[in-house]
Image: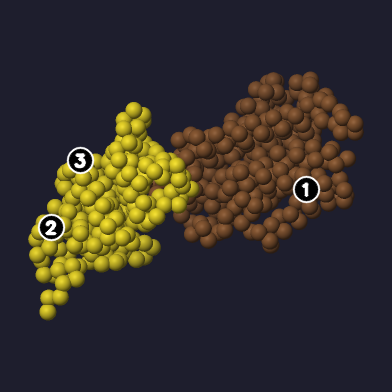
Chain colours: A brown, B yellow
Amino acid sequence: MLEQQLINGLTLGLIYALIAVGYTMVYGVIQLINFAHGEIYMLGAFFCVTLITAAGLPFYVAMLMAVVCCAMCGILLDIIAYRPLRRAPRLAALITAIGMSIFLQNLALIIWGSRSKPFPRTALPGYLTEQALTVGSVGLSWLQLFIFAVAIGMMLLLYLVIQKTRIGTAMRALAQNRTAAALMGINVNRVISFTFALGSAMGAVAGILVAIYYNTLYPTMGYTAGVKAFAAAVLGGIGSVPGAMAGGVVLGVAEALGAGYVSSLYRDGVAYAVMIAVIVLRPSGILGRAVTDKA
Amino acid sequence: MLELKEVQAFYGTIQALKGVTLEVNAGEIVCLIGANGAGKSTTLMAISSVVPVGGGTIAYDGRDITRLATDRVVALGITQVPEGRMIFPDLTVLENLRMGAYLRRDRAALKADEAHALDLFPILKERRKQLGGTLSGGEQQMLAIARALMARPRLLLLDEPSLGLAPIVVEHIFEVITRINTEGTTLLLVEQNAQMALQVAHRGYVLETGRVVISGTAADLLADPRVQEAYLGMDMA
């Protein structure tokens, strides 16, 4: 029972982590909570399914293309909605983000309808629908292993990009001091675009994985996932990428344990309780630093 | 090399520059002196396009750069060491240096320049793997200068390099400033420490409330009673 809940929690947590890094990276470079990030996650799932059902593409190709499309959507979102407000008060950008979230959700409703759709499972490679191994009463599916592998792989890749590449270092520099970054000759808008692309790609992957895992997708799916991943980012310390990863996993496990041992009705409640506890007890998050450091 | 004509700049409705006209010739060290709030830093920020220019023109090698984006100004060879150093606290010393060379692609020459920069400030070599934020004020200033040099600027804008530093460190910094100049880089230097600045500079401008009020060779300025009284701390009475 416990082992099973831990495995389920880890699966969910890695997905939250994938979404949460998008919130935290964007916050790091432009101090904006991109509330439309959950919608990018939703679009990832819909793009992927549409490419499979309408265009007849094989799963992996559809997934890759959906991720690339979402990365471009992320860039466009920034250019259209946020860039004009770069010098405006932060509240203006924040409200715009909420507006973009509502807009994208409704756009999806118009395009794909409000009814939830199943993921076209026949398009999936056969093994993804099979059980990988069962030990006693604990089952681990190939799909869960696939989620582990993809999520951990993406996060390792992200880590390497941020730590080792020129543009990744520029991202960190920009987050630490924007004026100084510009004075280094860094094209600030280009680095911000890159950050949106990277975060959106991670979010899209998460959306696709969830749609397969729960075998369902619907236009409002980004809302709950978005709020929870945001909670994970806050839990880890907003602005901290390793924090978002850790926060996602902690939140996923807490939620699975809450659902398993208390009642599955409290699944979402646990996530919000964790977020409230963090805000009250340690507002800077697990790996975040005190806000005064930023000044 | 650099020519400012009647440059104006605003912070909201406050006019920080009311028409600054000055020029810097290739090979020179030119210093801007003046009291707090006179517009010295704003002038440098306007040249780097960090503060938008509200009027007037800035030309570099005869080309109008008034409205260029900051990164394009850097690409033309104008680099700034900003007031307060603005090093990246969570990047290592080496990463800070590499950010200075962000626009350069010539990897081989980069290595040599990195070695040269660490050579100018040997302490940075010892600390190259440390995070920038763990350095002392003087070391941060050295890092800021070394980082700016990594861009191989033709014109280096230096804002208050001596601010808050111990006299012995200030002396070292000014030695390096002279050395950078003899190695071929033109400098525009903003300093509160007018005495020190005028000793290394060829020419200078005195700014008061957003305007140039006195200009001349460094020797002339040092001898000017108005400068002596207001900026060199000499009692004329």
Quadrant in which the N terminus of chain A is drawn: top right
Q: Secondary structure at mark 1?
A: helix
Q: Secondary structure at mark 3?
A: loop
Query: Would residue B107 appear left or right of A101 to someone viewing this image?
Result: left
Residue carrying label 3: B183
Disc 3 residue type (three-letter): Glu
Residue at coordinates 59% horizontally, 52% vertically from top-left? Answer: A288
Disc 2 residue type (three-letter): Ala
Q: Secondary structure at mark 2?
A: helix
x and y, in percent, of residue A109 in the image: 71, 41
Q: Nearer the viewer, mark 3 or mark 1?
A: 3
Residue carrying label 1: A254
Residue at coordinates 14% horizontally, 60% vertically from top-left? Answer: B215
Q: Is residue B76 above or below residue B215?
A: above
Q: Nearer the viewer, mark 3 or mark 2?
A: 3
Residue carrying label 2: B218
Kindly tell me whether residue B83 is visible in this rendering: yes
Kindly tell me whether residue B210 is visible in this rendering: no
x and y, in percent, of residue A38 in the image: 66, 44
- Outermost residue on the bottom side: it is B237
Estimate the spatial distance between the alpha carbons at disc 1 and disc 2, rounded to whole Å: 69 Å
Query: Would residue B142 appear left or right of B196 to someone viewing this image?
Result: right
Query: Would residue A155 appear left or right of B94 to someone viewing this image?
Result: right
Instruction: Locate residue A256: give its quadrant.
Output: top right
Residue at coordinates 49% horizontally, 52% vertically from top-left? Answer: A85
Which chain is mark 3 on? B
Q: Nearer the viewer, residue B190 or A73?
A: B190
Q: Which of pointers 3 and 2 lies earlier in the amino acid sequence?
A: 3
Estimate the spatial distance between the alpha carbons at disc 3 and disc 1, rounded to whole Å: 62 Å
x and y, in percent, of residue A127 in the image: 79, 21
x and y, in percent, of residue A36 in the image: 63, 46
Q: Nearer the viewer, residue B56 or B25?
A: B25
